[in-house]
Image (spheres, rainbow, N blue to C red):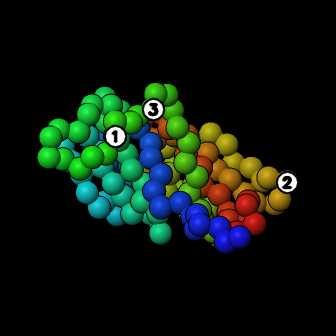
Amino acid sequence: MAQEIEGVLEAALYASDLDAAEHFYGTVLGLERIARHDDRHIFFRCGQTVVLIFNAEETVKAAPPGALPVPPHGATGAGHLCFRVSGDRLDDMVAKLTAAGVAIEADFRWPTGARSIYFRDPAGNSLECAEPKLWNL
């Protein structure tokens, strides 16, 4: 039987300060901004995936009449997202984050030999950059 799911199209994190999120993901991480809608959400392109940053206080509200019928959703607390970064670029990423004043919480090798670095965005979400071989990709 063929697998219908081909991959992850989008991943969502939540932040109450979208201005800080826009600066962090757009300027510090260098992701391309696709769209922003007031204080509700901001979307970034990340390879073949889209990173959605939602303000949870806004996404729990029902869609107004005539809007797209996206159901209310949201999360509380810090989330996690892992970015794919080739091993030969991880040191560059550490330098870029450090220069921007972002603390590296962990930098280690998994039993697979893959290296990961962990840090936080301004909303407290746990972010990771890891070599694809972490998951044999």
Q: Find disc 3 in the rendering and name its residue.
A: 75
Q: Mark 2 touching mark 3, by CB under 8 A?
A: no
Instruction: Decide: few, some or many residues near mark 3? Use Cα within 10 Å; few <14, some 14-19, many ≥20.
Output: some
Disc 3 from disc 1: Cα separation: 13 Å
Decide which of 114, 11 is in the foreground and name it. Answer: 11
Answer whether residue 32 is visible to the viewer in this image: yes
| Quarter assignment of residue 130 | bottom right
Is any atom of residue 21 visible in this view? no
Quadrant of the image containing the N terminus: bottom right
What residue did someone put label 1 on?
Answer: 71
Residue 29, given in percent of the width and then of the height, sits at 43, 56
14 and 18: which is toward the camera: 14
Looking at the rendered structure, the kind of residue marked 3 is Ala
Residue tagged by mark 2? 111
Left of 73 or right of it: where is 68?
left
Indicate left or right for 7 with 60 as reference.
right
Q: Using residue 128 as the reference point, say whether residue 107 is left or right of it.
A: right
Callout 2 crowding tier (Cα within 10 Å): few <14, some 14–19, many ≥20: few
SS class, disc 2: loop
Q: Quadrant of residue 2?
A: bottom right
Answer above or below: position of 77 versus 42: above
Task: Please name the residue shown 39% across and 50% down the image.
Answer: 52
Residue, x 47% and y 51% (percent of image)? Answer: 11
Q: Percent from the top left, x then y, of residue 124?
A: 48, 33
The residue sitting at 31% across, 45% down in the picture is: 70
Front tag of 3 and 1: 1
Is 26 located above or below residue 40 in the figure?
below
Viewer-nearest of labels 2 and 1? 1
**Residue beneath the point at 29% across and 61% down:** 34
First in sequence, mark 2 or 1: give its number: 1
Question: In the current view of this chain or complex, which residue is farthest to the right?
Answer: 111
